[in-house]
Amino acid sequence: MKRHDFGLSGERIHLAVEGSTGGTTLGLHLAADIIEDGKRVLWASVEMPDPARFSQLFQHLSLVESSRFHAMNFGGRFDRAVDALLEAATSLPSVGLVVMDDWCPSSGRIPTDRLEHIERVANECPDHVTVLLVSKGSVDASGSTT
């Protein structure tokens, strides 16, 4: 079966999903597409993607191509992680996708300073770079009020 190519170029996307429903997998699929197009991917998250899932989605890429996937952890100070991410996005050649996976708490209110840093990512990444934010939470989508 042929892989679907989403043809991204400079979009700002916020994907809000429930946990374990494929948000990270979609991000990895998009990353593989961007890498296949000869561009780099910057991936930031609290935890790195599952190695088995990563291998499945990147199996069609060579080791040289896979080396254009740059991952970092933002488990410490979020502001410093955003600074490093923006520095890489503006200084590395041919960055095509920036992914921030699990960038906010899965429940409760998102801290204001975190939203400000996310706004910086959206505004300061070059226009040709797609930004994908994946947030996970628990939401009752049934419409029930009880």
Image: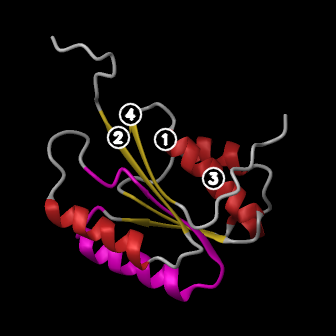
Give the alpha-carbon distance from disc 4 to disc 1, as whole Å: 8 Å
Q: Amino acid at mark 2?
A: Lys
Q: How many angstroms separate mark 3 from mark 1 (CA)? A: 11 Å
Q: Quadrant of the N terminus?
A: top right
Q: In the rendered structure, which disc, 3 or 1, sits on the residue that comes first in sequence?
A: 1
As measured in the structure, the alpha-carbon distance from the residue carrying label 1 to the one carrying label 2 is 8 Å
Q: In the rendered structure, are the residues bearing label 4 and label 1 in contact, judged by CB atoms less than 8 Å apart?
A: no
Q: Please say if the residues under marks 2 and 4 sit with CB atoms less than 8 Å apart.
A: yes
Label 2 near label 1: C-beta < 8 Å? yes
Label 1 or label 2, whichever comes before in sequence order: 1
User: According to the image, label 4 marks what residue?
Assistant: 19
Residue at 26 percent of width and 41 percent of height? 106
Q: Which residues are magenta?
A: 75-104
Q: Position of residue 60 (x, y in %)?
A: 80, 51
* CB contact under 8 Å: marks 4 and 3: no
Q: Residue at point 58% right, 85% down?
A: 92
Residue that badge 1 annotates:
23
Q: CA distance from mark 4 to mark 3?
A: 18 Å
Q: Secondary structure at mark 4?
A: loop
> Which picture quadrant has residue 56?
top right
Which residue is the site of mark 2? 136
Callout 4: few (<14), some (14-19), or many (20+) C-alpha neighbours within 10 Å? some
Disc with the residue nearer the chain's start (3 vs 2):
3
- Mark 3 lies on residue: 30
50 on left or right of 93:
left
Q: Is residue 43 left or right of residue 83?
A: right
- Quadrant of residue 115 within the rendered picture: bottom left
Give residue 125's position: percent from left, percent from top.
46, 76
